[in-house]
Image (cartoon, helix red, strand yellow):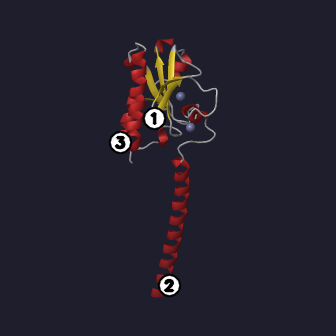
Amino acid sequence: MCESNMKRKRLYIAGLAGLGLIVLVSIYKSGSNRSSVSVIRDCFFCDFAHHRKGPPPVLEVETDEYVIFKDKYPAAKHHYLAIPKEHFDSLKALNRSHLGLVQRMEAGMMEFFRSKNIDPTKAVIGFHLPPFISVRHLHLHGIYPPSDMGIGNQISFMSSFWFKKSEDAIRELEGREL
Ligand SMILES: [Zn+2]
Ligand SMILES: [Zn+2]
């Protein structure tokens, strides 16, 4: 192959790579645009957190960042959900910058249990992982006493690849990229 042919071939490959890069960047951009919308229109957990449509559940705790309310289908006598006001599909949508949020949600759930004279270290506190999530809006379960749970719920809320305790979720987020 002569020199100019090689050159043309190299230019062609560079052009293709450039085009591929542009396509990738635009896909990535459209994806990140979607996820940067903090409140999703058709998400009833967003509605709960922002008092948008009724009848909302009673908000037991409300801060600037999250709310806590009773789970509609309690697995035990005490079963609450902490959800952020900002919309995230699940734990998988978070990066290390969300570590503080998850820590504060966990602390809020623990404090709420303490206010009910419940030792939070004896409660089950954690997140379901996709695709095992019932609602696509990040929610932290807090359940007490675990002995109330039937076998189905014991399985659903056991540490596994479908359920992650908050302490494990926090440890994992610490290792994630920004
Ligand atoms: Zn939402
Ligand atoms: Zn869940």
Q: Are marks 2 and 1 in contact (CB under 8 Å)?
A: no
Q: Amino acid at mark 2?
A: Asn
Q: Earlier in the sequence, mark 3 or mark 2?
A: 2
Q: Nearer the viewer, residue 114 or 1?
A: 114
Percent position (x, y) of residue 2? Answer: 47, 87
Graded by Cα atoms within 10 Å as few (under 14), some (14 to 19) or many (20 or more), the crowding at tag 1 reads few
Q: Amino acid at mark 3?
A: Gly
Q: Please, is residue 6 above or below residue 156 in the view?
A: below
Relative image position of residue 113 (x, y in whole percent): 42, 18
Q: Secondary structure at mark 2?
A: helix
Q: Quadrant of residue 99?
A: top left
What secondary structure is found at the residue carrying circle 3?
Answer: helix
* Closer to the eye: label 2 or 1: 1
| Residue at point 51%, 74% (across, down) | 15
Q: Badge 3: how crowded within 10 Å, few (<14), some, or many (20+)?
A: few
Residue holding disc 3: 175
Q: Secondary structure at mark 1?
A: loop
Residue position for label 1? 64
Whether ligand 1 has any atom under 8 Å from the Cβ at mark 2 is answered as: no
Which residue position holds label 2?
5
